[in-house]
Image (spheres, helix red, strand yellow):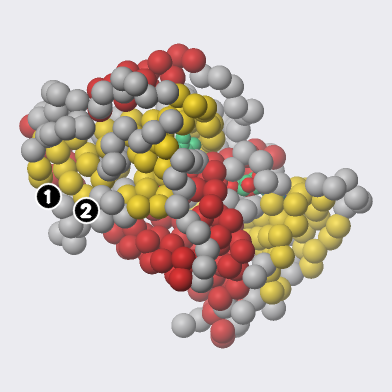
């Protein structure tokens, strides 16, 4: 059986990987631009935001993503990451109480004393030993390589539940792909190109010449190591109804530097670059009314939840097609 996946970010690459495991002949169409998944360092952190919310699938998602990275590395793919733990400093007793009330029983955690490299002034620190970080682009690359899918560079311009029209990047004429299933994983840019209205939030991270802390620190902003130094992330621009080409968000970069300074001393650290992406909200995982399958709207949790949701989607898709190899 044949499947066509539109989009090669973490959603599309993970869907392609599990389709490959299910024995489906898979083609991935990827425009290769504006992928939020190319964030230099993404946290795999189940305790979110400044209120400490934990998604119902967060623990399973975290373990699933680590398991998948292990599997890829066993197959010889290089995916820079560290399951190092994440420190979540909290400003006061109220925040500690709020975070504490959200922590599920199965979450391995501890409360530790604030200490260097944290800047002074934090009241409490939540230690999440099973969290960590991963470099986005190498993970997507490894998933696509391991999937066995053929990857076509180009943009899908029209699609139904069994046919996709593609404008290849090499400017040759449009090509048509026939399939038993079509899965749309186009992220923020793809949703806008498809004429949909949704909630999009641009965000930037600053690339740093070195890691400020060996462990990711996260509250308001995050400081994390990468394979090539460190990052300070991420801004949240105002919600917009569509994707827009990245701009230089000077005002929010000043805000970001302030938040970074509040986490740790940034003295002597150089900014080596900026990366900007767009988050799409409104999770959709399953078939739509036209019979096109979708995994999109992963918001800020693409690496925490994307692989798990991709595996579930492929399971359901195989079941609906009566494709027994994928139903385990
Ligand atoms: C600043 C920032 C920081 C973040 N930090 C984290 C974090 O710490 N932890 C975490 O879990 N998540 C984080 N995220 C969120 C995460 O990056 C996203 O949830 C995730 O990458 C979305 O993946 P996706 O595959 O749905 O979309 P994308 O990564 O956007 O991929 C979509 C792909 O589809 C292609 N495409 C679109 N339309 C078409 C078409 N018609 N034809 C062909 N190709 C098409 C695009 O070119 C792109 O390559 C962050 C996001 C940002 C912006």
- Residue sitting at x 37%, y 41%: 225
Label 2 within 8 A of ligand 1 by Cβ: no
- Quadrant in which ligand 1 is drawn: top right
Residue that badge 1 annotates: 110
Query: Which quarter of the rendered picture does the N terminus lie within?
Result: bottom right
How far, Cα to Cα, is label 2 from label 1? Answer: 8 Å
Left or right of 25 in this view: 13? left
The secondary element bearing badge 2 is classed as loop
Residue count near mark 2 (Cα–Cα under 10 Å), binned few <14, some 14–19, many ≥20: some
Residue that badge 2 annotates: 129
Can see residue 287?
no
**Residue 21 position within the rendered picture, expressed as x and y whole percent measured from the top left:** 56, 76
- Residue sitting at x 77%, y 49%: 154
Left or right of 114 in this view: 17? right
Question: Label 1 near label 2: C-beta < 8 Å?
Answer: yes
The secondary element bearing badge 1 is classed as strand
Label 1 within 8 A of ligand 1 by Cβ: no
């Amino acid at each position: 059986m044949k499947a066509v996946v539109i989009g090669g970010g973490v959603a599309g690459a993970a869907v392609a990987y599990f389709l490959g495991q299910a024995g489906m002949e898979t083609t991935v169409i990827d425009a290769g631009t504006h992928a939020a998944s190319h964030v230099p360092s993404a946290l795999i952190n189940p305790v979110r935001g400044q209120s400490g919310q934990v998604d119902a699938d967060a623990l399973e998602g975290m373990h699933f993503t680590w398991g998948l990275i292990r599997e890829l590395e066993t197959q010889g793919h290089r995916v820079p990451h560290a399951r190092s733990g994440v420190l979540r400093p909290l400003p006061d007793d109220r925040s500690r109480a709020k975070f504490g009330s959200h922590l599920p029983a199965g979450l391995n955690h501890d409360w530790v004393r604030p200490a260097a490299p944290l800047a002074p002034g934090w009241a409490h620190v939540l230690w999440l030993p099973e969290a960590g970080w991963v470099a986005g682009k190498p993970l997507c690359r490894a998933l696509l390589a391991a999937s066995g899918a053929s990857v076509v560079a180009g943009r899908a311009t029209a699609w139904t539940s069994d046919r996709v029209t593609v404008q290849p990047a090499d400017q040759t004429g449009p090509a048509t792909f026939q399939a038993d299933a079509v899965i749309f994983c186009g992220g923020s840019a793809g949703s806008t190109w498809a004429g949909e209205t949704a909630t999009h939030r641009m965000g930037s991270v600053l690339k740093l010449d070195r890691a400020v802390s060996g462990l990711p620190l996260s509250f308001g902003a995050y400081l994390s190591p990468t394979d090539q130094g460190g990052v300070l992330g991420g801004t949240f621009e105002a919600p917009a109804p569509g994707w827009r080409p990245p701009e230089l968000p000077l005002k929010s970069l000043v805000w970001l530097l302030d938040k970074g300074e509040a986490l740790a001393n940034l003295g002597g650290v150089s900014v080596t670059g900026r990366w900007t992406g767009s988050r799409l909200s409104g999770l959709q995982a399953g078939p739509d009314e036209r019979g096109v399958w979708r995994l999109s709207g992963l918001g800020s949790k693409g690496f925490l939840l994307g692989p798990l949701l991709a595996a579930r989607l492929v399971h359901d898709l195989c079941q609906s097609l009566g494709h027994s190899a994928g139903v385990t």
